Amino acid sequence: MELLKKRICETGQVIGDRIIKVDGFLNHQIDIALLNEIGKEFKARFVSSQITKILTIEASGIGIACITAQYFKVPVLFAKKNEASNLDKDVYSSEVYSFTKDKTYNVQVAKKFLAPTDKVLIIDDFLANGNAVQGLLDIVKQSGAQTLGVGIVIEKSFQQGRKKISDENIQLESLAIIKELRQGQIIFG
Ligand code: G4P
């Protein structure tokens, strides 16, 4: 998606050789016009799928999923990372290790919001090591629902995420693929 790549080049900050900071439009301040284009692009790429629900994970996935859901006209469900007293006790859960934060989360989704008849599109901001997406795939499996696709805004293909997900034989679409971060430069795949 050229518009997205252009924005990453213009405002993204490369941190070392593994992290790209995009808090000017995606992770902190959010550019809604750009998110609208991202939502349209996901709709175009998952056109034949009979999606009934979009699943994401808090926090940064939520805004992207909500705007995308307007094009699919389906609800958004987000996995919670923290124990909350207002969360149902009857939950699907999966452990997700974050390399970036060196922390393991027990991510949870209330069972009542995911039915075996659901056809799920997973949406997230980054695909790095793939742990977040694997946790969401695990939750969908537990529910008996089916994952029809995974939509990612920025994939870092020098990390292991795609390999882990492609083993599952699920349509994976990334709108910008970064194959290398080198000396402050962003090299797209
Ligand atoms: P994984 O989910 O693919 O395994 O990736 P990893 O453990 O490395 O990432 C953990 C968190 O860091 C995720 O956010 C992910 O979106 C984010 N992340 C990974 N690589 C980058 C990067 O290059 N730039 C930025 N800006 N973020 C990155 P999270 O913990 O879910 O945080 P949030 O959604 O609450 O912001």
Image (cartoon, helix red, strand yellow):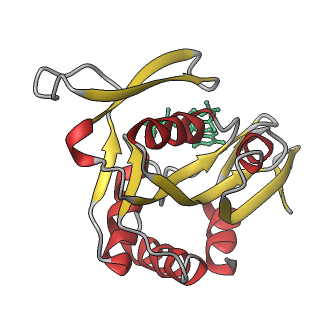
Query: The N terminus appears in which quarter of the rendering?
Result: bottom right
Q: Is residue 93 visible?
A: yes
Query: How many numbered discs sit on the rendered protein?
Result: 0
Residue 81, horizontal then vertical, whole percent:
36, 28
Image: 136 above or below 1: above
Vertical order, 82 against 156 (above or below):
above
**Percent from the top left, x then y, of residue 156?**
75, 48
When asked about the image quadrant of residue 171, the answer is bottom right
Residue 174: x and y in percent read 67, 63
Q: Residue 66 vs residue 127: left or right? A: left
Quadrant in which residue 63 is drawn: bottom left
Please report the residue visible at 12 percent of the width from the left and 20 percent of the height from the top.
85
Q: Quadrant of the C terminus?
A: bottom right
Residue found at the very far left of the displayed protein: 86
When the figure is inspected, residue 133 is found, relative to residue 63, above or below; the finding is above
The residue under the point 26% across, 63% down is 75
User: Which one is in front, 166 or 124?
Assistant: 166
Relative to 57, does residue 9 appear above or below in the rendering? below
Q: In this orientation, does residue 29 appear?
A: no
Q: Quadrant of ligand 1?
A: top right
What residue is rendered at 32% in x and 63% in y? 66
Left or right: 163, with 47 as reference point: right
